[in-house]
Amino acid sequence: MPETSSLTILQPYPGIFAYYDGRIAGTRLHSEGPNWLDDGAYVLGVASYAIVDGGEALVYDTHISVPHAEAIRGHLEGLGVTSIRVVLSHWHKDHVAGNAAFADCEIIALALTAARLAENREKIETATPPIHPLVMPNRLFEGRLDLKVGQRKVELHHFVIHSADGNVLWLPEEQLLLAGDTVEDCATFIAEAEQVATHIAELKRLRDWPIARILPSHGDRDRIAGGGYDRALIDANRRYLERLMDAAAGGTPIGSLKDFAADEIAAGSILYFEPYEEVHDSNVGRMRAAARRI
């Protein structure tokens, strides 16, 4: 089937579009064999976003393939957009795979993201499926960058959550956070286990912002379509990491994600999604390994 046949275009707010794919039981896009696209992104559901005002658009991440990115660009151009810029949330493959579709555009990223992409270029370009050629960002910043999309104010902020190069997109007038992978529903994926204490501190810093709603890269399709999540998602991700770090350090038995995050699931802060059990198992293994190295 066409690679974008299950791609859905959502509009949670005027001028804010979510390009959502995945979380379809029994469906794989690339192959039956293990691969990052199906097993690390599609199965969990993945969204890239665009902010549109007049003839300008800012795309937040380029999705899981060039065809997905081409579909995003085609949709924006169909709306009358004539100027497109791209922002990368971080360096992981499911956020940069479609960069080639925007090779003629400004691609904005943290300097650290560019460094991580350069360091891992060979692995990325020879992955399964390959991202080749890997188109690099061409405008770099550190810390914070203020932009305008038409008349809309947009801020980019560096947060060391999930990955050292986390870059969130903040619309201050709407109090809307496009979060990348800094938070997930229903459990954050631990990519840098040794830095989890820093991630927890950074989640506390993020929680202090006057956030009304959150649009994550990995979350429930219907909740994103309905406007996203509130700050309880940040709390749920932080508490998950805190409990996991304590349990791993103390050698305490750790059960299933459904039991481990039962309070947050019951409260509705997160929605239980069974494929995240594999993410949880990976997290437990990484945290126990990190605890043994301390």
Image: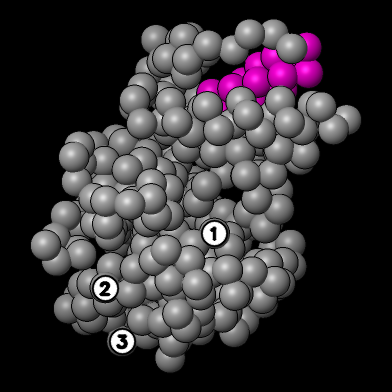
Q: Magenta segment, which residues?
A: 236-250
User: 10 Å neighbourhood of mark 3: few (<14), some, or many (≥20)?
Assistant: few
Residue that numbered label 1 is attached to = 92
Q: Quadrant of residue 98?
A: bottom left
On the image, the x and y values in percent for residue 207 come to: 62, 33
Q: Position of residue 243 (x, y in %)?
A: 66, 17
Q: Is residue 59 visible?
A: no
- Of marks 1 and 3, the one in the foreground: 1
**Residue 229 seen in the figure:** yes
Labels 2, 3: front one: 2
Q: Secondary structure at mark 1?
A: loop
Q: Is residue 280 above or below residue 264?
A: below
Q: Residue at x 33, y 52 (%)?
A: 33
| Residue position marked by numbered label 3 in the rendering | 82
Q: Quadrant of residue 249?
A: top right
Q: Quadrant of the C terminus?
A: top right
Pinpoint residue 264: horizontal percent, then vertical percent.
47, 15
Mark 2 to mark 3 CA distance (whole Å):
20 Å
Which residue is located at x 47 percent, y 83 percent?
133
Are the residues flagged by discs 2 and 3 in contact, CB closer than 8 Å?
no
Quadrant in which the N terminus appears: bottom left
Tell me the amino acid under the disc marked 3. Thr
Dot 1 and dot 3 residues touching (CB under 8 Å): no
Please tell me which of labels 1 and 2 falls first in the chain: 2
Residue type indicated by callout 2: Pro
Question: Is-magenta flag for residue 244?
Answer: yes
- For label 2, the crowd category at 10 Å Cα-Cα, with few meaning under 14, some 14 to 19 and many 20 or more, is some
Task: Identify residue type, mark 1.
Answer: His
Q: What mark, if any, has residue 67 been given in the picture?
A: 2
Q: Earlier in the sequence, mark 2 or mark 3?
A: 2
Among the 4 quarters of the image, the one containing residue 245? top right
Number of other residues with Cα within 10 Å of mark 1, as a class: few under 14, some 14 to 19, many 20 or more: some
